[in-house]
Amino acid sequence: MLDHTGINVSDMVKSRAFYTAALAPLGYSIREDFGEAAGFGVAEGYGKALDPGGDFWISAGPLNTPRPHFAFSAQSRAVVDAFFAAAIAAGGTSNGGPGVRTIYHPDYYAAFVLDPDGYNIEAVCHRAP
């Protein structure tokens, strides 16, 4: 199990606002904010052991190349839908709207969004409807 991971972003203000909005439906919020770096993590009650600083970090710096892909777990298909709507409203670009991707398995329900720097961010629910 991963404890935490992160990416570099070109504009901390823009990316902080994007991730705050996009990850909120998944139960994420900023856990630590150092100005040039911010850690996002889930609130108590989401069934995860918590790193107090968060498990997903953004930091000001040169963009990661190639751009990594991150998939965040969603508790339901409705949460995937909410993630997608929030991410698009916050300035993300659709990279595949909410839907079932049977290529992975029959209940793989996901949505993909490119963040302001072009990172492919996904929310996925593996549960049957």
Image (tube, rainbow, N blue to C red):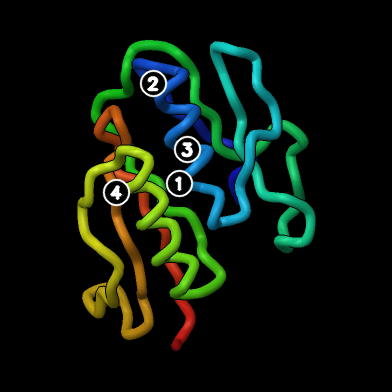
Identity of the residue drawn at 47% across and 37% down: 19
The residue at which mark 3 appears reads as 19
Q: Amino acid at mark 4?
A: Val
The numbered mark at residue 79 is none
Give the class, few, some or many, for how many residues have Cα within 10 Å of label 3's Cα (few <14, many ≥20).
many
Question: Which of marks 1 and 4 precedes in the sequence?
Answer: 1
Question: Which of marks 2 and 1 precedes in the sequence?
Answer: 2
Q: Is residue 35 above or below residue 78?
A: above
Mark 2 residue element: strand
The answer to whether the residue labelled 4 contacts the one labelled 2, judged by CB atoms less than 8 Å apart, is no
Question: Which of marks 3 and 2 precedes in the sequence?
Answer: 2
Identity of the residue drawn at 51% across and 74% down: 76
Q: Amino acid at mark 1?
A: Ala
The residue at which mark 1 appears reads as 22
Mark 3 residue element: helix
Report the mark closest to the observer, 2 or 3.
3
In percent of width and height, residue 38 lies at 59, 24
The answer to whether the residue labelled 4 contacts the one labelled 1, judged by CB atoms less than 8 Å apart, is yes
